[in-house]
Amino acid sequence: MSLAESCGAKIHFNHRVHQVDIDTNEIQFDVESKDEKQTYANHDLLIGADGAFSALRNAYVKKDRYNYSQHYIGHGYKELVIPPDENGDFSIKKEALHIWPRRNFMLIALPNTDRSFTCTLFLPFEGDESFEQLKTPADVRRFFEIHFPDTLSLIPNLETDFFQNPTSSLVTVRCFPWIHEDKNLLIGDAAHAIVPFYGQGMNAGFEDCRILAELLDETENPDWHELLKKYQHKRKINGDAVADLALQNFIEMRDKVADPEFLRRKFIEKELGKLFPEIFNSVYEMVSFSHTSYSEAIRSQHAQDILLEKVMQAGDFQTNLNNPSFQESLKNWMQEYHKAIKNIQASL
């Protein structure tokens, strides 16, 4: 915020958008300290970076032929805390994302700078094993004794945290268009709110900013109508792709990471990346550790499935690496994969 102000931005605190006129860019705010609505007008361009329940997008929804959907998954989440140990250090390994997968639900833990961990329980809202069944401290204690017994010594305030912290829902938002003429546009969660299972929500918003900035840098006096259309064309396909990737990764995290065959596949993915760094990069690493577009990453999944099925059906990967016949087959499979990826890139 300080950097924004140093560049000329003016920040208004305690203002909640009440209504937006997308044809005039007039905005009405509910202001915490005032009874009447505060109105701001005469904006050349309005950017709605106002989150999953965007007021600007709500104004779009009221227009004719606007496509909008929101989908809540059947799971919610609740945050718990693993505090530092008695010496003030991390209680468990800090260089890791800790996952307790239990098929239809899971617990995860991520390290914080104060040496605590934020734990998140992802659990169905209703059903036999769900939030609706955990009504008392004894219910919560019994549930963790059954499903997460090794965490009980790590979460000393389990029952207190459980009932003090809210149970929150998880939504995916899809909409189109993201722009209105040359007047306003949606960006970040306002355009493509996603579930958190790939850790890409903020990154996807930052990438929107980067693409928009690059388009602005291409011309000194932009035609705003054409520029916003280019922004929408570049980002809509990727907003949809990252939403699908995030939903897919929930299944991997809660279910597949407990499957030995899945872990074997992940090991082979890592080794192929080392052996063929110019050709192969797993979908996970494309998404998390590269600038590969989300749309290219999700379309690469099928090609990687074909490649890895061939490698895994051939037997033990490490043993096969010493087999000249397998080496030749692997070389051919990698060439086929590389061709498939090039075709995907050309089609985007």
Image (cartoon, helix red, strand yellow):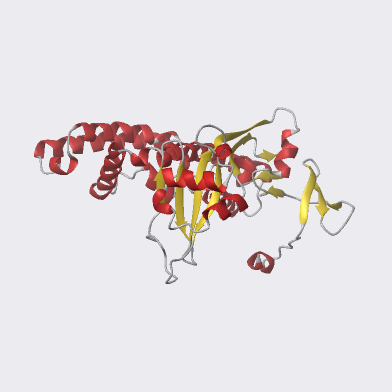
| Residue under the image location 59 percent in, 42 percent down | 135
Q: Position of residue 8 (x, y in %)?
A: 71, 65
For residue 173, side relative to residue 90 (left or right) = right
Among all residues in the image, which is located at the extreme top?
65
For residue 125, side relative to residue 13 (left or right) = left
289 or 248: nearer the viewer:
248
For residue 21, side relative to residue 171 (left or right) = right
Residue 64 picture quarter: top right
154 or 249: nearer the viewer:
154
Q: Position of residue 178 (x, y in %)?
A: 65, 39
| Quadrant of the image containing the N terminus | bottom right
The relative height of residue 156 versus residue 223 in the rendered view (above or below) is below
| Residue under the image location 25 percent in, 45 percent down | 272
Residue 183 picture quarter: top right
Q: Position of residue 97 (x, y in %)?
A: 41, 53
23 or 29: nearer the viewer:
29
Among all residues in the image, which is located at the extreme bottom?
87
Q: Position of residue 346 (x, y in %)?
A: 41, 36
Among all residues in the image, which is located at the extreme right?
36
| Residue under the image location 87 percent in, 51 percent down | 37
| Residue under the image location 52 percent in, 51 percent down | 203
> Can residue 181 be seen at all in this image of the molecule?
no
> Can residue 330 be seen at all in this image of the molecule?
yes
